[in-house]
Image (spheres, grey):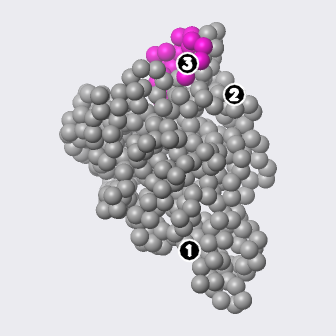
Amino acid sequence: MREEFGHTSVTDTERGAEGPTPLEQFILNHRELLREDPNTWAPVKSQTKLLLDAAEGRRLRVQKIGSTHVISRSGVRVGGVSDGVSTLVGHQALRATVSPELTRRCLALSDVPFLSAKTLHVSQAKSAAAFLDRTKRPVSILPSAGLAHGGLAVDLRTRDQLLQAWDRTSEAVSHMPTMRQQIEVETFLPWLPLRLFVVAEEVVAAVARLPLYAIGDGNRTLDQLAEAAVKRRNASEHLEPVKDADLRDLLDILLVEGQRVLPPEQVRLLTNDRRGQMGAGWSVDITNHIGPELTDLAVSGMWSVPGLGASAVDILTPSLAPEGQAVVSGVAPAAALREFRYPAYGRSQLPNRAIMQRIAALANN
């Protein structure tokens, strides 16, 4: 059976009705790699340092003026870096992508498949319930603002489940100014989250963004597996320690299932966020495994926002060969380059160099 929603469609097998979900299957397929110790990176450079070092590597002159770094060649200004973002990103484009609603409008106008979602104020719980009724599919909710921690709830299937979760997410944003107390309600897809970095018309780096997870061995309880997973994650010195708010999902899971022995090779997701190592999970370099379809989707996603010449694009996909099923879930021009430069697993990629190479190339035109 296939049902349509928004700009994509989903089959029963893709949503994991039988067997592992696409995200769990990716983890199982790469379990030998993921059992190895994560990469160790030292020193870890800041966003601005990565960009400026790349500029100097292109023999571009860097001069700091106030909080901005001006990049020039032969006395002529060719670009710059401000707050870790290069001049390949227009100011209006940067502002537009801060708003998920505006980003979705740009994607829709360009006919780019995107995740069906809506931005609502905390006072609009009834509108969220109406979204659930209209999509006729499970939904997820999460704070709109990246500065809010916690409050993520997934696979909500009934109005009661949604409204109970809404209260918790509202609490997570309650410290923010009233007008910014906003929540995203989106169609829930148990797919593989990817972040691809696009410069001009080329994907120069890509990672799979895995949440914290456990794989059963038939001996240890979920409590024991979760403790080992958190300890292993926090032992990675180049990654920020997992915050308590990031583990609220995990604590809820353990209250219900903590004493259950997980069968061999069964995957249990311990958190539900899609941020990879920028959250409580892991990022895995997959740059050499991205095919033309995902490349085209990422490039189209970036170009849908006027004024963008370099940006990360977030994608949800049922596989690395999605056959028309993948969707864009976000566009992030201010994305952290260190996720690609210092991935927990796989090879280091250098989007910072690609950015400066593009700036230098534009200066030659």
Question: Who's the residue at 46% across and 28% down the image?
Answer: 21
Which quadrant holds the C terminus?
Answer: bottom right
Helix or strand or loop: what does disc 1 sit on? loop
Q: Report the residue marked by disc 3.
A: 266
Among numbered discs 3 and 2, the one appearing first in the sequence: 2
Question: Who's the residue at 46% across and 20% down the image?
Answer: 19
Q: Residues within 10 Å of mark 1 (few under 14, many from 20)?
A: many
- The range drawn in magenta is 247-267
Instruction: Kindly identify the amino acid type of the residue bearing the numbered disc 2.
Output: Glu
Instruction: Kindly identify the amino acid type of the residue bearing the numbered disc 1.
Output: Thr
Instruction: Kindly identify the amino acid type of the residue bearing the numbered disc 3.
Output: Gln
Q: Residue 148, relative to residue 246: is it above or below?
A: below
272 left or right of 237 in image: left
Q: Residues within 10 Å of mark 2 (few under 14, many from 20)?
A: few
Instruction: Tell me, for residue 87, which label it has, or none.
Output: 1
Q: Report the residue marked by disc 2.
A: 32
Q: Residue 243, relative to residue 216: is it above or below?
A: below
